[in-house]
Image (cartoon, rainbow, N blue to C red):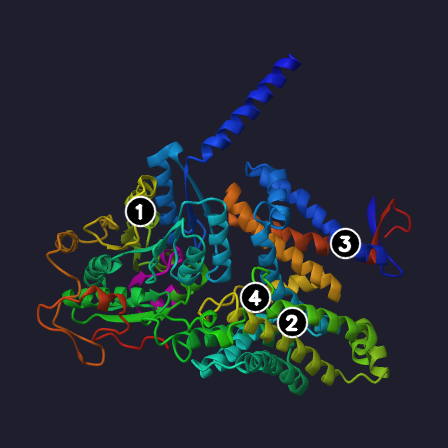
Amino acid sequence: MKFAKLLAGAAIALGLAAGGALAQDKTKVGFVYVGPVGDGGWTYEHNQGRLAVEKEFGDKVETVYVENVAEGPDAERVITQMALQGANLIFTTSFGYMDPTINVAAKFPDVKFEHATGYKRANNVSTYSARFYEGRAVQGTIAGRMTKSNVIGYIGSYPIPEVIRGINSAYIHAKKVNPDVQFKIVWAFTWFDPAKEADAAKVLIEQGADVILQHTDSTAPQAAAQAAGNVYTFGQASDMIEYAPAPRISSIIDNWAPYYIARTKAVMDGTWASVDTWDGIGAGMVGIGEITDAVPAEVKAEAEALMAKIASGEYHPFTGPLKKQDGSDFLGEGETADDGTLAGMNFYVEGIEGSIPE
Amino acid sequence: MIRLEKRPQPSRAWSMATPLVAVLATMVMGGLLFATLGKNPVEAIRTIFWEPVFGEFAFYYRPQLLVKGAPLVLIAIGLSLGFRAGIWNIGAEGQYIIGALTGAGVGLAFYPMESWIIFPLMVLAGAFGGWAWAMIPAVLKTRFGTNEILVSLMLVYVAEQFLASMSLGLLKNPEGFGFPGSRNLQQYASAHNGEIIAGSGMHWGVVAALIAVIFAYILLNRHMLGYHIRLTGEAPRAAKFAGVKPARLVLFCLGTSGALAGLAGLFEVSGPSGQVSIDFNVGYGFTAIIVAFLGRLHPVGILLAGALMALTYIGGDIAQGNLGLPSAAIQVFQGMLLFFLLAFDLLTNYRIKLGTEGAL
């Protein structure tokens, strides 16, 4: 009996050793997250992408992640740690990881890096992001139709081009369906801080906003809207379906899974190359969550028609004539914004009140 | 019946032993926590405490311990002076931010000129920035009797707003495509607080932290001012008779701790971080409070405590990556450390008695 146990133990030990040897053949993929995987928004969706990679490749991949990593030296250390531990491909999923990613990539030329939402690339560093502004156009349309007070609140995270683009896109399309609409913008200076986000939502509601858009990652604004009643919101980054049918009436869903699977496959096949990817509704990187019954059928149809036109490439959310906030010309009649202009967008379009923080 | 009896004299033995006992208790309870999460507790504890120092990649983690520990020690040394005298600077995080801003500001003002004088000027500016920010609660306290705990803490949030404003405005990188954040000082040789010996992690902030430890030790043990600080904390009335001027002590303690926090900020922004950005501060100023108490407000103790905290941060991240521990579990683990420290600290002043003798 004892002997049998001993044998079994030895077999397990051997099996483990063999497993260890096999692990060498696995492709190791690392993920660095700025928030906790349970944030219900940005990081949650990146983690869904990671799980999708595991599901797709099964035993052929090993994924690791570190969550709540502060942007700066801590990020650099965590990325280095992953590279040292043998990761073949590392996704760094926050804008502030840009310089750390570039620094580490220079030290590990054989490891591939993918940085989300940045603009610095290298031979072994790709960048990727989604055209969230396409989703914002749909949200703006619904918001413009749904508001009764004609005040739409917007919780900004940081005044970077990514966020400003979203505000402009939402405003342009809200204005199109409701010329009386007005935007109130509060800057939270955080990507994820439920307390600050809830405060921002409450301030906007007190200022008369009855529809709130957010560019922050938690569900706190949804909860604040629910408590206030008669306020509509949109899920951000993730579906946030637990707040449907109201206050959450639709959402922008970041769908990273196809990209993560494709890039992992490229590393496995040895075909990985440094690229700059910027996909939208058409490619499926930006999803629009279910538009609930709280939205009248004709508004829903209007939003879905817009979505289809954007997806097919028939319509670009930044199509002229458009002016900048200061009254100068932005786009002429029928002209569309090029990607360079969009990537560096640092101005409001005409009609938005207030100034971008400096 | 178990009851507590006040010791006539605080126990020296317990005072020394408390941190060790607290670390051991944290390991045991932390291990239990990790076990309930389905992880091998021994491996988790080993990963946190052993891996960074002796593991396979220790050549990388050991220098990182210095990088992570130096600002903690530098700030905690400053705080400990005030804490000993009962002057509570809770706003080191704010002084750290302002020091980074003034220091980086001076450096960026010279860009792109190269000169050896730039970095020393930045160091002075950083120390001055932190000092000046700490002078606000100090002067308000000495002049109007305001509470320095509240004022210094509130000023952290003011400093954070300054930081955001500077990252978006005055100090923004003109070549940064409109993104917030300053130029990267790592790419500006005259302003870069680089490693003194390549691969060692030893930057000027580490040197400054070690010097601060030595100076604090001498000050507290060999100098009249140090004696006044200790006396004020231990016996305020006696201190009065000994001719201690409380206002001067407040200005000195808050000023020194502010200057050291400012220095820590400057060394961080010009070295490991490299950039003034909205998220520049990651809580060193608050963690340093834990470090100061974990080190018994003693300079050498603080040095050890800073190293221990750095270890749990770096080991914690490794445990996340290798074992899949959630970051919240690591934070709980770190929280346990302070909790057990405070809990066992009770035994310094009290002893446990069995029985009902001298019924209460």
Label 4 or label 2, whichever comes before in sequence order:
4
Residue toward you, B181 or B145: B181
Parent chain of label 2 = B
Q: Are marks 4 and 2 in contact (CB under 8 Å)?
A: no
Give the spatial CA distance, label 3 vs label 4. 35 Å
Circle 2: residue type: Ala
- Disc marking residue B132: none
Report the side of A222 relative to B95 (left or right): left
Q: Position of residue A155 (x, y in %)?
A: 34, 65
Residue found at x 65% / y 69%: B207
Q: Residues within 10 Å of mark 4 (few under 14, many from 20)?
A: some
Residue under numbered circle 1? A272
Chain for disc number 4: B
Location of residue B313 with respect to B141 vertically, above or below: above
Q: Say if labels 3 and 4 share a chain.
A: yes
Q: What's the distance in space between the residues labelled 1 and 3, CA to CA?
A: 54 Å
Label 4: which residue?
A: B195
Kindly indicate whether the residue at mark 2 contacts the one at mark 3 (C-beta within 8 angstroms).
no
Say which chain tag 3 marks: B
Q: Which residues are magenta?
A: A201-222
Look at the numbered disc 4 and give the secondary structure of its residue.
Answer: loop
Classify mark 3: helix, strand or loop.
Answer: helix
Q: Nearer the viewer, mark 3 or mark 2?
A: 2
Is there CB contact under 8 Å for labels 1 and 3?
no
Quarter of the image with the N terminus of chain A in it:
top right
The residue under label 2 is B208
- Residue at x 39%, y 78% (from the top left corner): B169
Q: Position of residue B287 (x, y in %)?
A: 61, 62
Q: Which residue is mark 3?
A: B18
Residue B241 x, y percent position in the rendering: 86, 83
